Every structure is written in C-alpha cells, then in structure tokens.
C-alpha cells in the first residue's frame, strides 16, 4: 500500500503537466489571434486536443498551465477582422481607434476605404506598385501595447505575422519593426515600405523554399476517424472550396495551373486556395518559427513581441460554417501545429521564459439554412427596397450602405433644407419595415444621448463602434441569426450577438495564475493586463481593465 502511494507520488511529480515560469520579465510575448475562433471551439473539440504534458500540448498547454477566461467578449457591435485585431493589443474600442470595420465609406473620397490601405507606401517583396503591398497601420488613430514597449525599450523588436494583411499589421502597432503577410499571387510573404525598404535575408530564404507551391494539389483528409466529428459532412448551406463541387472530404488544394484555360477561374490567383486549408496554418507557423530564428526574438536580453494571427479558421469557417467537418478538422490540426510551434519555442527560448496570450478577433453566426430563424440577406436588393421607401419622403438622401450603416448625403439634405434628425429617424423606421431589421440608432442619438445609451446594452455596443468621422448616420440592427451575405452559402459575423462576441482569452506565463475564470472579461482588457505584466511606463489610456483575478 505504502509502495503504491510512493509510486503515485512519483508519478505525480514525473507527469505533473505544470510548467514552472521564470520570475524575470518575459523574453518573448507571443500574441496569438485565431481568426473566427468562437469560444465554443475550445469546449466542443477539447476531447480531441492533445493532452497537456510537461513539454507538449497545443491549446491544452496554454489552458492547463495558464488562465482560461471563459466569459470573454467584445464590447462593440462591429465584430469584424480588422476591428478585433486592432482591439487585441490596443485595449480600446473602435470609437477611439477609428478602425470601425474592414472597409468603411469615406465621405471625403466618396468610396470605401480599406482598413490598412495606404497609397503613400510601396510593396516590398513583390513589385513596388502592387496594391497587395500598399498597406500600413496609418488608419489606426491610437498607439498600442507594442508601441508602449517600443517607447520604453527601443531595442525590443515587434513583428506581426498573418496570411491577411490586416491580421499582421494591426496587432503589431504603429512602431513595429515589421508586419509580414501572404501575397496569393506570388506566394511570397511581403511587407511595405512603411516598415522596411527590403525583406530581411531570412525571409528571402524562407520565400525561396517555395512552401506554398508544395501545397498545390495536396489532399486534405480528416486527421481522426469520421465518427469523431459532429454534424454531417455535407450539411445544408455549406459552400465549396475553389475548384470543388461538393463540400465533402477528401479535399484537394486546387492547382489553378491545371485549369489555366477555364474562364471560371480567370480572376483567381495561384495561391488563393491555400488560406482555407490547414496548409495555410502550417505555412503561417513555419514563418513564425523562421522569424524567431532569423530575428533572434526572445534571445537578445530584452522583451520582444511576436504577434501571429491564424487566418485559416476564418476562411474555412466562412465557407463551411463552424460546425462543419472541415472547420473541426482545421482546428484539431491547428492544435497539433501549435504543439509543434510551442516545442520550437521550448528549444529556442524556453516556453517558461515566454508570456502567451491567445484570443480570436470575433466569433461567427451559424449557417442560416441550419438554424431556426436564420436569415440570409443580400445588400443590393435590401438597399434598393430601403431607397424606394425613403425616397417617398426624402428623395436621393442615401449615399452609401455598408456594415449595416446608412451614410446620408449631407449636401443634399442641407440643400433641400430637410431636418437632419428627422431624415435619420425616417431612414431607421423604413429600415425596420424590412425583413431582418429589428432596431436602429441614429447619429444624433449616438452623439447626444450617450448617457441614455449607457443603460441600453445594444446601444452601448453600437456607441463603442461609432466613430463620428468614419461611421454612418443610421446603424440598422440585424435580427439574431440574420446577416448580409455575399454568397448563397456559408456564414459570416459582424453583429453584437453572443455568437459573434464570445471568444477565448488564454493567458499563460510569468505572473499568471492557473485556473478557469468565469467572471465577465473583455478583449479590451488584454492590453492593460499585459501593460501591467510587462511593467511598462509609457502612458496609454485603455478602455479595458487590468484582469487582476488572473494575476499572481
Ligand atoms: Zn476575422
């Protein structure tokens, strides 16, 4: 009996999964955003994730060794990629950061503005005039945590990586050493002259390996036996991968070179098929490893920051939905890819010398065809109906419609001497007569009735998304499970509903308590918490709070 308990005690010591974290400042902060990873991915797929062992595990390595905030939400209504990534390390709502959406209508140029578009810079890593490289964080109106670190410690390096330009650029801040994103035309990882004039040698070498080319034509099968996946493979409303006709396994990364004459694909670029597959996550994490190696991140006696955003879950989730076999498999495979990435960090820096934080930029709605009350709306016919209704009293006052926001033609309204507040209200009321709209907020309300809106949970979230110079004049509130769709299949995000706002927040590393924390938290709380953990001096005004409950 005694022998057994000693054996158990020894087993406990040998297999104790807990990591001992260093008491020094972290050598590397690893900020991971998983694009579209709703919180419930972690609970639904937990049983398929690798177990946390002393030196292994993917998601579970962070969960078991760190703090798992199970009730973390976004605090604004425009739950979109650019906004989530901007919020992640700036700790402020879009009302202050100015990044209110991926694209917004810019009245001064009378067309849409892309969140990271910057015509004053040039591409680096491809031909300088290519639009894919004309990107920077110029449109962000605030500095973030990475900028605070660079002010305090100018020799610290900050690098951002993602397949998507906005996923790489916005978390890394305005003073980043570089952000690198994937060009699906050339297959190269690129940057812009905002950061540097040339690519570093290590990145030229990485691009030279031509990993993306090696993925073309590769097959994608389920990692686990089919019985482990919930739902059916071919569920209603699922879309298809480029070059495929059915949403079922096995898939293949379409090689456009085999269909060069097919006019159906004439607008597609050679590497477009990669980002919706697990090969895209592998490619991203391979680059993250190359950046750690090439820049000696976390190995130079100062704290560095690496932000990595995994865009694949979003590309795949938009097409197939979060309950699909494809999305499940992508995330199960991502778990193994994270395990590999963490093992690399073990070797280079030591996991215990790093501080990890993982979240998502937004959640996602269920596929309408699979949901009671689900509704797929289309912008064009919706806008036509809205204009027809509004025209009966105020002709030609609607200038643009995007992100469920109506932009009014202020000049027309002034010339006709219409009362602005009355026009806004009428547009909102006419919107509510259309299928899928349940409420509205006008610019006048958002500007002058802030105190009242504080008692309205939806109003508060709309207000947090409202930037006077960039937002529209009437925000239409969609009914639950309804969205504006570009296709007849798939799903999207972008509302204040729980399915779009509830995301994981995992912290792991020095100064972090282990445990599950079910009190309400918000993505705006991540940056002030990291600021405290890194002991930074540079003053930044965050909208969030320090998550004291997870601090040792
Ligand atoms: Zn996203």
Image (cartoon, rainbow, N blue to C red):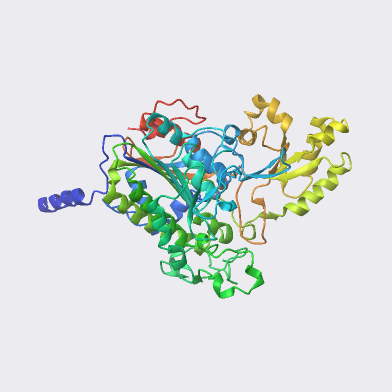
Figure label count: 0
Image spot of residue 428 (x, y percent)? 77, 39
Q: Quadrant of residue 287?
A: bottom left
Q: Is residue 96 left or right of residue 212?
A: right
Image coordinates of residue 506 in percent, x first then y, are 41, 43
Rendered image quadrant of residue 306: top left
Residue 80 picture location, percent across and down: 58, 46
Left or right relative to 99: residue 61: left
In the image: residue 322, left or right of residue 342:
right
Is 420 placed above or below 436 here?
A: above
* 310 relative position to 431: left or right: left
The C terminus sits in image quarter: top left
Question: Which residue is rendered at x = 40% and y = 34% of the image?
Answer: 530
Front residue of 161 and 396: 161
**Can residue 363 be seen in this snapshot?**
no
Residue at x 37%, y 58% (from the top left corner):
336
In the image, residue 406 sits, relative to residue 375, either above or below, namely above
Looking at the image, which is closer to me, 409 or 449? 409
Residue most extreme to the left: 3
The residue sitting at 84% across, 34% down in the picture is 413
Q: Position of residue 155 (x, y in %)?
A: 36, 35
- Residue 212: in sight, yes or no? yes
Q: Nearer the viewer, residue 546 or 179?
A: 179
């Amino acid at each position: 009996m005694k022998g057994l308990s000693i054996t158990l005690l020894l087993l406990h010591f040998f297999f104790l999964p807990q990591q001992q974290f260093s008491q020094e400042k972290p050598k590397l902060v690893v900020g991971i955003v998983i694009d579209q990873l709703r919180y419930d991915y972690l609970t639904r797929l937990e049983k398929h994730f690798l177990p946390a062992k002393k030196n292994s595990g993917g998601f579970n390595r962070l969960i078991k060794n760190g703090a798992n905030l199970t009730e973390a939400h976004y605090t604004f209504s425009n739950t979109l990629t650019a906004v989530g990534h901007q919020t992640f390390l700036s700790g402020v709502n879009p009302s202050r950061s100015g990044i209110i959406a991926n694209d917004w209508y810019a009245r001064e140029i009378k067309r849409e503005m892309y969140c990271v578009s910057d015509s004053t810079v040039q591409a680096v890593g491809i031909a300088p005039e290519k639009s894919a490289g004309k990107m920077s964080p110029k449109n962000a109106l605030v500095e973030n945590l990475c900028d605070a670190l660079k002010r305090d410690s100018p020799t610290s390096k900050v690098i951002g990586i993602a397949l998507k330009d906005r996923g790489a650029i916005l978390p890394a801040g305005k003073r980043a050493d570089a952000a690198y994103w994937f060009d699906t035309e050339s297959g190269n990882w690129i940057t812009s002259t905002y950061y540097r004039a040339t690519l570093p040698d290590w990145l030229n070498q990485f691009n030279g390996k031509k990993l993306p080319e090696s993925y073309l034509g590769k097959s994608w099968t389920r990692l686990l036996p089919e019985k482990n996946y919930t739902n059916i493979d071919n569920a209603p409303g699922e879309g298809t991968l480029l070059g495929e006709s059915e949403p079922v396994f096995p898939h293949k990364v379409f090689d456009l070179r085999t269909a060069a004459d097919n006019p159906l694909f004439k607008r597609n670029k050679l590497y477009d098929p990669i980002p919706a597959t697990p090969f895209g996550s592998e490619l991203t994490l391979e680059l993250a490893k190359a950046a750690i190696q090439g820049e000696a991140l976390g190995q130079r006696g100062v704290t560095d920051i690496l932000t990595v955003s995994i865009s694949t879950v979003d590309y795949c989730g938009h097409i197939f939905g979060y309950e699909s076999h494809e999305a499940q498999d992508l995330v199960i495979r991502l778990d193994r890819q994270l395990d590999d990435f963490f093992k690399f960090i073990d070797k280079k820096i030591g996991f215990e010398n790093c501080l990890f934080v993982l979240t998502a930029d937004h959640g996602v709605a269920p596929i309408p065809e699979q949901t009671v009350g689900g509704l797929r709306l289309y912008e064009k016919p919706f806008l036509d109906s809205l204009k027809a209704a509004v025209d009966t009293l105020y002709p030609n006052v609607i200038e643009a419609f995007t992100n469920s926001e109506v932009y009014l033609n202020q000049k027309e309204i002034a010339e006709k001497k219409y009362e602005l507040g009355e026009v806004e209200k009428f547009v909102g009321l006419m919107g509510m007569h259309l299928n899928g709209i349940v409420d509205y907020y006008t610019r006048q309300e958002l500007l002058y009735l802030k105190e009242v809106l504080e008692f309205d949970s939806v109003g508060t979230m709309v207000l947090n998304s409202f930037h006077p110079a960039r937002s529209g004049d009437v925000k239409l509130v969609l009914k639950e499970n309804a969205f504006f769709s570009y296709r007849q299949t798939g799903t999207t995000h972008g509302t204040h509903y729980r399915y779009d706002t509830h995301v994981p927040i995992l912290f792991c590393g020095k100064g972090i308590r282990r445990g599950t924390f079910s009190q309400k938290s918000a993505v705006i709380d991540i940056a002030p918490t990291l600021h405290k953990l890194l002991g930074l001096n540079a003053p930044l005004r965050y909208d969030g709070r320090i998550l004291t409950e997870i601090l040792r």
